[in-house]
Amino acid sequence: MQPTATRKLDRSRQLQQRAEKLFPGGVNSPVRAFRAVGGDPPFVVKGRGSRMWDADGNEYIDYVGSWGPLILGHAAPDVVEAIERANRDGASFGASTPREADLAEAVLEAFPAMEKLRFVSSGTEATMSAIRLARAVTGRKYVIKFEGCYHGHTDALLVKAGSGVATLGIPGSAGVPEEFVQFTLALPYNHIERVDDAFKRLKGEIACVIVEPVVGNMGCVPPAPQFLDGLRYLTSREDALLIFDEVMTGFRVAFGGAQELYGTRPDLTTLGKIIGGGLPVGAYGGPAEYMDQVAPLGPVYQAGTLSGNPLAMAAGLATLRHLRDNRELYGRLDRAAATLVDMVADAAHQAGVAVTANRVGSMFTWFFAGEPVTDWDSAAKSDTALFGKFHRALLEEGIWLPPSQFEAAFLSAAHSMDDISQTVVAARKVLAAIGR
Ligand code: HOZ
């Protein structure tokens, strides 16, 4: 790797100035502006395996992986080939294609809780549609979500949300009338008794509970033992639906997602990221009895011009086939991530910097916090200024972490032991400097 300690970013700065004239904050998704960590966002021009290169030729070991989809790393050969082959036949038809069923079968094989699904173009669409379906199925209005969980930017779910909303310290969003969120209850994650209370208070009125079974959008926060089973028990008892938002965790924490890892079966599942292999995609699914309520069979309307897009289907299928045929990859990812996460946490400890490391498989966060991080209140106690310092200094060393304390980092199958050693060496140097 070329030395990056005196990284030049001239070209990136020119591109940033141009972008700022064109896009709010110069970006098409807020966290990319690096506002929470300070410093200038490099403009990326190429990725290969575990690495990315910016417009000035600086090289980085990437731990964002396009925010989760790239479990096989950048430009994985079988994914690139599948996209190229599909593209030669035409990029979009607005009509059904065989690839949609190919990918659907691959998804359903891994997620037995789903009998049918519907492809959409983003995680936001998937969760929005799943909520609509849950309300239709139950004939009820209220939705329980959890503080610090992020389910995309649909109006009803932008309440005490994680991801960029948490990163920028926005309590909700301007432009969302309070009437639109009057049926959304935001409760603390991992506090099952609060969910029980809500069900008692609003008896027969709660349509569903939506949860990230492992949170990635307030940083990585695993479920407490019995939390997911507790949600399953309460939703079944109250005839409400349980929705697992596995946009981040699906095919990530295990082949069959968090529902396989923890053995809890939701009613509806939302997916995205990995199932599109780096192209825009989302999906929601569940038992046929529920899914058949969606138009054209049923009265729940939902549609999309690019839904089931042939290129996204091809990229997703190549990714899922690779994962299915190389299941041992999950064990390898788990061990490699454990090594990385623990060694950096040790380095922090030795440098006298308070860090709490959270990890599930290959998703993880180093919280700059002295206490366990189990919910939004504890995540929010992190020293975000110190995290910003850590982020900026690591970037100088050629290590690219998510530019927010409240976003999970990801390891891919393309990361080598050499990548991990380089990252640990860089983190030791940075932590020793900031711990002084
Ligand atoms: N909200 C996304 C991650 N949780 C960030 C998307 C992006 O900026 O690309």
Image: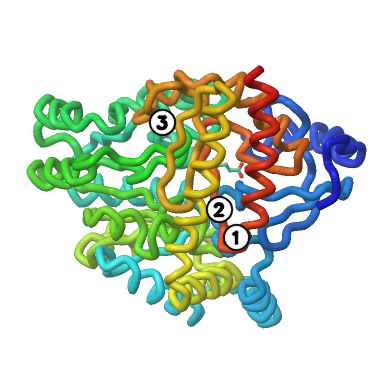
Q: CA distance from mark 3 to mark 1?
A: 25 Å
- Most foreground residue, 144 or 406: 406
Side of 235 relative to 406 (left or right): left
Label 3 environment density (alpha carbons within 10 Å; few <14, some 14–19, many ≥20): many
* Disc 3 residue type (three-letter): Gly
Q: Which residue is mark 1?
A: 278
Side of 164 relative to 3 (left or right): left
* Disc 2 residue type (three-letter): Leu
Disc 2 or disc 3, which is closer to the eye? 2
Side of 420 relative to 228 (left or right): right
- Most foreground residue, 214 or 421: 421
Label 2 environment density (alpha carbons within 10 Å; few <14, some 14–19, many ≥20): many
Q: Position of residue 421 (x, y in %)?
A: 64, 50
Q: Is residue 79 above or below residue 181?
A: below
Q: Position of residue 353 (x, y in %)?
A: 55, 23
User: Which residue shows up at 54% across the image and 41% down it?
Assistant: 343
Q: Which residue is mark 2?
A: 411
